[in-house]
Image: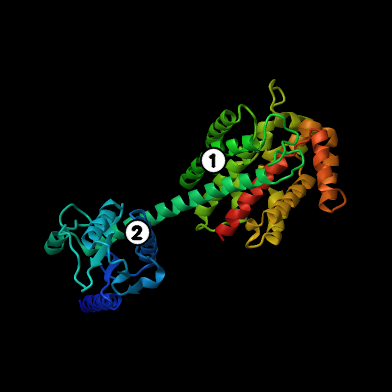
């Protein structure tokens, strides 16, 4: 009982101090606006309440901007006391109608999915609260909150349990949304970066179609736009996935097939990104799944382990169709060249060793804070990364188109990287020999994607 009185005293003192903050802000006849939380019981301050308050404050800021209300919402006006999280700011625009603002803030509370946990208060220039005379409902039922408090219809324990479950659920849902949106954004960004590298040996770029007569730069942009929604769908699958990872591949592939169909529709039948849809789809799934498992910190070992669990024995299971009449390009190159011709499936099954052993360290060394702002510098880095891939990867696209020149291409790419052969000479060689290192281009896009998310989710 004594402890309860002490806690109540602390809360009352904190609320009195808040009044002082308002008075200080209202100097020069300014009205004020404040945001706080309805948290039953004590303590009012926890890790969950802080995370929740940060999210709510951002939601409120966006709400005000959307309604063209010019009130600055920033950290310097945020306080933490025994009564919980508290934000208070003066309303510098004296033309704002305070009654209308109060109605608007109540709209924010009523329409927000956790609005019953939020208190937005408006005070006039003399410190008098603006009221719309609307009665707040109880957290647990539809009755007025004042009646439930007076009649003690609910225990503090029940109210507190409900509040924290609601807060945690909202934090989780917002975190999920942010992660999926970011992963989707980085996948699209990586794909656009890759196609924009100019010039490229045998590949479509901004100025040339390389060894491809059925596509150009805009074909690739159309394809990028068509497949972009499916990264979000794969991410959603990964975030909610609870089954054995060995069973995930068909689920990922179902979405991948839909993406392929959209791609073909957007490109008039040109295969711009089939291989990329496969490896990026797997990687989007593995990255989201591993991020969720590791407290949203990217761990390359966990990512690779997840990927290898999904693709276990994929080469043996899918490329050994020796009696199949209509073999895919991948099946043909595997039948002819063995593991050397296993292409994207082998890379995925091994956890993309070339990316983590060579390209990621190269990017870490080359990329600076402002690299993305310098077009020429970025273009040169990505050209070198592509050469690294071409000189180290057995590209099934090259083997299928011109297997006789496959080893020569790797040697030339390495010589170009060392400055012994001119880069444009390599581009001309690929065009004349009908060589398109598309597998290496796909791995470049994937390398960028993984580099981006590794830096975001440190």
Mark 2 Cα-neighbour bin, 10 Å: few <14, some 14–19, many ≥20: some
Where is residue 439? Give x, y as percent.
Answer: 71, 40
Where is residue 105? Give x, y as percent.
Answer: 27, 58
Where is residue 257? Give x, y as percent.
Answer: 56, 32
Q: How is the image coloured?
A: rainbow
Distance between the Cα atoms at labels 2 and 1?
30 Å
Q: Is residue 409 above or below residue 174?
A: above
Residue found at the far top of this picture: 325
**Location of residue 274 by image quarter:** top right
Q: Is residue 224 above or below residue 130?
A: above
Residue labelled with disc 1:
228
Task: Describe the element under mark 1 as helix, strand or loop.
Answer: helix
Residue labelled with disc 2:
60
**Location of residue 216 by image quarter:** top right
Q: Nearer the viewer, residue 418 or 253?
A: 418
Q: Nearer the viewer, residue 131 or 54?
A: 131
- Residue 43 visible in the picture: no
State the quadrant of the C terminus: bottom right
Q: Earlier in the sequence, mark 2 or mark 1?
A: 2
Residue found at the far right of this picture: 420
Where is residue 447? Give x, y as percent.
Answer: 66, 50
Question: What residue is shown at x 41% (from left), y 53% (from top)?
Answer: 174
The answer to whether 457 appears left or right of 88 in the picture is right
């Amino acid at each position: 009982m004594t402890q309860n009185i002490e806690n109540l005293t602390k809360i009352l003192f904190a609320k009195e101090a808040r009044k002082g903050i308002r008075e200080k802000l209202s100097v020069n006849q300014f009205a004020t606006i404040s945001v706080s939380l309805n948290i039953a019981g004590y303590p009012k301050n926890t890790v969950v309440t802080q995370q929740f308050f940060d999210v709510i404050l951002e939601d409120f800021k966006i709400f005000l901007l959307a309604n063209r209300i010019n009130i600055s919402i920033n950290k310097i006006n945020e306080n933490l006391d025994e009564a919980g999280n508290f934000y208070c700011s003066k309303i510098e625009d004296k033309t704002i109608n305070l009654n209308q603002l109060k109605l608007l803030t109540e709209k924010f509370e009523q329409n927000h999915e956790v609005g019953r946990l939020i208190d937005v208060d408006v005070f006039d220039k003399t410190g008098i609260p603006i009221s719309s005379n609307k009665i707040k409902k109880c957290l647990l039922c539809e009755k007025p909150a004042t009646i439930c408090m007076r009649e003690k219809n609910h225990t503090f324990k029940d109210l507190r349990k409900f509040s924290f479950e609601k807060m945690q659920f909202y934090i989780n849902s917002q975190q999920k949304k942010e992660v999926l949106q970011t992963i989707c954004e980085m996948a699209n960004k990586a794909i656009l970066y890759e196609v924009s590298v100019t010039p490229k040996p045998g590949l479509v770029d901004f100025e040339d179609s390389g060894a491809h007569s059925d596509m150009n730069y805009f074909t690739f942009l159309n394809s990028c736009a068509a497949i972009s929604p499916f990264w979000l769908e794969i991410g959603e699958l990964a975030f909610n996935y609870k089954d054995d990872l060995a069973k995930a591949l068909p689920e990922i592939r179902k979405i991948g097939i839909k993406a392929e169909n959209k791609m073909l529709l957007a490109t008039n039948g040109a295969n711009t990104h089939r291989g990329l849809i496969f490896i990026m789809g797997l990687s989007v799934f593995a990255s989201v799944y591993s991020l969720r498992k590791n407290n949203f910190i990217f761990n390359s070992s966990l990512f690779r382990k997840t990927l290898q669990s999904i693709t276990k024995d994929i080469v043996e299971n899918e490329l050994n169709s020796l009696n199949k009449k209509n073999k895919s390009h991948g099946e043909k190159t595997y039948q002819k060249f063995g593991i050397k011709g296993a292409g994207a499936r082998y890379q995925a099954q091994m956890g993309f060793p070339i990316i983590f052993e060579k390209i990621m360290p190269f990017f870490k060394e080359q990329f600076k804070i402002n690299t993305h702002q310098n077009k020429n510098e970025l273009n040169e880095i990505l050209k070198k990364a592509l050469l690294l891939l071409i000189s180290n990867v057995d590209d099934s696209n090259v083997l299928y188109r011109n297997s006789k020149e496959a080893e020569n291409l790797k040697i030339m790419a390495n010589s170009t990287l060392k400055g012994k052969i001119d880069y444009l000479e390599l581009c001309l060689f690929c065009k004349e020999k009908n060589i398109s290192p598309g597998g290496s281009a796909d791995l470049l896009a994937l390398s960028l994607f993984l580099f981006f998310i590794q830096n975001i989710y440190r």
